[in-house]
Image (cartoon, rainbow, N blue to C red):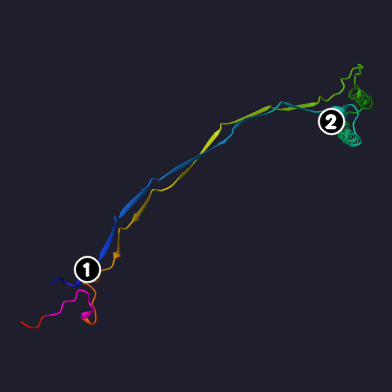
Amino acid sequence: MYPLIEIKTVPIEIEMKVSHAKLEYTRGTADLEISRNDGGLSIKSRPIRLNIDTFEARNSITPTAVRSVEQYAQQGQQAAYSATATFAQQGQLLLDAKIGQEMVTQFAADAQNKNYKPNVGLEFLPSVPPEITWDPGEMHIRYEMDKLNFDWRVNQPHFEFTPGDIELSVKQQPDVIIKYVGGPLYVPPSADPNHQPIDVEA
């Protein structure tokens, strides 16, 4: 007689995925930007400047009204000084005069000699030369070289750490399979075509 039931067990199936830890390193980069500033040459020059002041020279020929008044005032003042000196000298001579000495004739002779000015008809005009001055010349030279500007942009190196990982997944649940492998059961048993009566007599 063979068994009528077949029992089969299905074990659990587990899948495990392991990811290892890793450390990633990113190199630092550097960017360089170059700009240029142009120089140049500049020259500034100023020639000699001549200054001629002819004010006094023109006044010696045709004086202005103000200058004429000043000249007449100076001449009057000088004449007053001369007259005062003459009168003082004549008074001193009169004090020292002796009886019978002719003083009037001497005073007239002295006055004539003092006022006598020879006139030759020559006169230089203008009597005052012009005033001449000058400013020296100047030259400024400015030279500037070209300039190069370097702009560095440096990125620091970067480290990135990825931790490890373990992943468990159940691909097959455990199971028990019970299978009936026998033939059909007839009720009553006598309905079985292959039924054989049991002999109870022995």
In screen coordinates, is 191 left or right of 114? Answer: left
The residue most toward the left is 202
Could you say where residue 10 lies in the image, as x and y percent from the top left? 24, 67
> In the image, residue 120 lies at what x, y percent?
91, 16
Q: Nearer the viewer, residue 4 or 38?
A: 4
Q: Is residue 2 above or below residue 75?
A: below
Give the number of the disc on residue 42: none
Horizontal side of 93 relative to 149 (left or right) equals: right
User: Does 118 sit above or below residue 142?
Assistant: above
Q: Nearer the viewer, residue 108 or 56?
A: 56
Give the residue pinned by disc 2: 55
Q: Quadrant of the N terminus?
A: bottom left
Q: Which residue is mark 1?
A: 9
- Camera-side residue: 148 or 172? 172
x and y, in percent, of residue 181 in the image: 22, 70
Quarter-of-image position of residue 135:
top right
Secondary structure at numbered mark 2: helix
Question: Earlier along the polypeptide chain: callout 1 or callout 2?
Answer: 1
Location of the C terminus by quadrant is: bottom left
Q: Quadrant of residue 4?
A: bottom left
Q: In the image, what residue type sits under mark 2? A: Phe
Specify whether residue 152 is painted magenta.
Answer: no
Q: Is residue 101 visible?
A: no
The kind of residue on which mark 1 rests is Thr
Residue neighbourhood size for the residue with mark 2, other residues' Cα within 10 Å, grouped as few (<14), some (14–19), many (≥20): some
The magenta segment is 190-198
Is residue 7 at all visible to an observer of this figure? Answer: yes
* Helix, strand or loop: magenta stretch: loop
Residue 8 in picture, x, y percent from top left: 21, 68
Q: Residue placed at 19% from the left, 76% from the top?
A: 195
**Residue positioned 34% across, 56% down in the render:** 162
